[in-house]
Amino acid sequence: MLLLACFVGAVCLLITRGRRNFCWRNTKRLFRSGGLAAVAVRDALRFCSDILILVRLLLVLKVKAARVRGVDWSVADMFEEILYRHGDKPAIVVAETGSSTTYTQLDRRSNQVAYWALSQGLQKGDVVALIMPSCPDYVAIWLGMAKVGVCTALVNIHTKGPALAHAVRIALEQSKSHTPIVVVDRSLAALMDPDVLDALPETVRICVYGGEAEAGDISRDDMWSQIATMSQGSVPEGSRRGIMWNSPLIYIYTSGTTGLPKASKISHLRFFSSAVMFSVATRLRSNDRVYCALPLYHSSGGMLGVGGCWRARCTLVVRRRFSVRHFSSDCVAHRCSVVQYIGEVARYLVNSNETDLDQQCSIRVAFGNGLSPDVWRRFQQRYHVQRICEFYASTEGNVAMVNTTSKVGAVGVVPWFAAKLYPTLLLKMDPEGEELLRDSRGRCVPCQPGEVGQLVGLINDHDPARRFEGYTDSKASAKKIVRDVMLPGDLYFASGDLLRKDAFGFYYWVDRLGDTFRWKGENVATTEVAHVICGFPGIADVNVYGVEVPGTEGRAGMAAIALKESRQADELDWKRFFQHLNRHLPSFAQPQFLRVAAISSSTSHMTTTFKRIKTQLRKEGFDPTNIEGEALLLRDGVDRTFVPLSRHLYEAISDGSLRL
């Protein structure tokens, strides 16, 4: 009877579109109308399913936290539970080659890594940096480190120059070891150039993994050959003594809101909670195969994908780099029933030429974020996706939600009656959109349904679902905390993301706040890009921001450049400028558009009120009709330079015939 009452209540809530208009009269109308009832029942069941998933997620996490609190427990324990029954099952399959690594093989490889770490003098609490493409050994390395209490910093392989040096340095600063270690794949060893090494501690050791050692290369340790000599046997349990649920497992990098990459601290329990979220939301089965062409140094692939498969005892199919051409063939050849996506990946796929293999895909669930409504149905229909699970989460934050109802465009749901269970809020912003709006009492103002606001989550260090672990940089962590939001002394995590919600509690993505935008599935910190641009001769100042481009996800990078006195746009060597950007920035962070003027004529967007002016620059975008008196340039990846952006090129970009 209780379940029936809950069901009827949910149906009535959907029909009345909100609790304020609830009336039992609507229940009678519902059951008098068969067609309406059928639709309402379906939607109500989906809605209730989302709520049950939220409850189950929180329950599993709280029970696990209660069991491991005060005792030694790590992700290594979680992994080893798999071996008793599923050791011979493929853990990871490499899509390019079809090679398979079983759970037992992954365990043995990670044991070799653990023994190698001990042989190098690494101890509990130390940190190593890992720079490697997605592969089974990538997981084996950080798992092996975890078995002896060493934290692994998962460095983005597309990070270059000063940003790479910074990312490695802030990780190694957390290590107690006097000889900090960077593990780098041999194919990426060139990233550790002299400029990067000069910015690192003199005692740093570069340990190269994979392939054959190069003749005469004595400056770098050959970790690959050293590990091959190590024991594959179980690591002594004493090696994990003192590792607890809140000990750091890995660092994952995010640009945060401003500046160079920040290292987010991921504890063992945080990894477990991500695994629960993915496996429960997708209803993973042990016979599933999860296709992941996303990088394992990001949370989606490295935490949700890897951890979710562990928890369900199923197989992860990885590809080093996403390929539109190989997506369908991979899914068919490897019998993938679940796929992970980001919005840009899905858009690439639906805009590509259809193949016969598309019709042979049998995808039960697609799980990811950033899927825009115009792509949602096309993606689902083309690849026969039975269900799409769109989610919202931030690597460093304590707010996560998922939409398992297939409600197009929604990133999650937290209805009003679950607010106490999962305390998240949307808060109004001031008219300039930079600070939270507060009332006469100094409290923040919650948004009403349909209003856009910043998403925040209540912080409670005693609740594993509400903890904010933050960054390695305590000052950066402090900037993400908002105080006295609803009550004196309360603390909330400020996501920096703008969302809106409807009367049912479904949340919808709107935009990012601050000096960060997203392009090609990556976060771009404008201050980092601006620093690189200002390092080029002839440039006096720059303002970097993201602009919307029709038919794409996120925002493309654009830079308003002020040249030094007496300099004109046609006087700069744009080929050299292209090379300069390519040398110091990954491709996704390089601006696609430039608007250039002499410093004397660019004061309209080069003032001390940068944030307010940046809003206007975003509105003007890259439309030539909005920009007068300044040169407008487009990044030309073929000729490796910047060329004038004509009206013809603008229209080609806008209608999708010219892709960025």
Image (cartoon, rainbow, N blue to C red):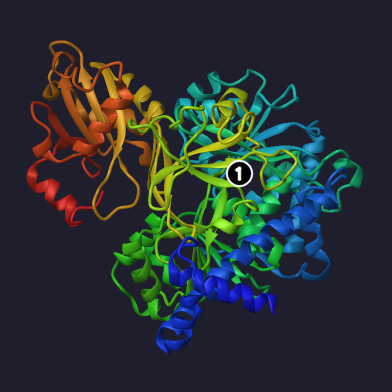
Does residue 286 appear to the left or right of 560 in the view shown? right
Image coordinates of residue 485 in percent, x first then y, are 55, 34
Image coordinates of residue 312 in percent, x first then y, are 69, 67
In this rendering, the answer to whether 47 lies above or below 544 is below
Q: In this rendered view, identify the residue nearer to me: 360 or 481.
A: 481
Q: For the N terminus, give its image quadrant.
A: bottom right
In this rendering, the answer to whether 392 lies above or below 180 is below
Secondary structure of the residue carrying tag 1 is loop
Residue at the spot 40% in from the left edge and 32% down from the top edge: 514
Residue at the spot 8% in from the left edge and 48% down from the top edge: 648
Does residue 535 appear to the left or right of 12 in the view shown? left
| Residue 337 visible to an observer of this rendering | no
Amino acid at the residue labelled 1: Asn
Image coordinates of residue 322 in percent, x first then y, are 44, 57
Q: In this rendered view, identify the residue nearer to me: 376 or 3.
A: 3
Q: In this rendered view, identify the residue nearer to me: 430 or 641.
A: 430
Residue 611, picture quadrant: top left
| Residue 170 visible to an observer of this rendering | yes
Does residue 470 appear to the left or right of 320 in the view shown? right
Q: How many marks?
A: 1
Residue at the spot 29% in from the left edge and 64% down from the top edge: 351
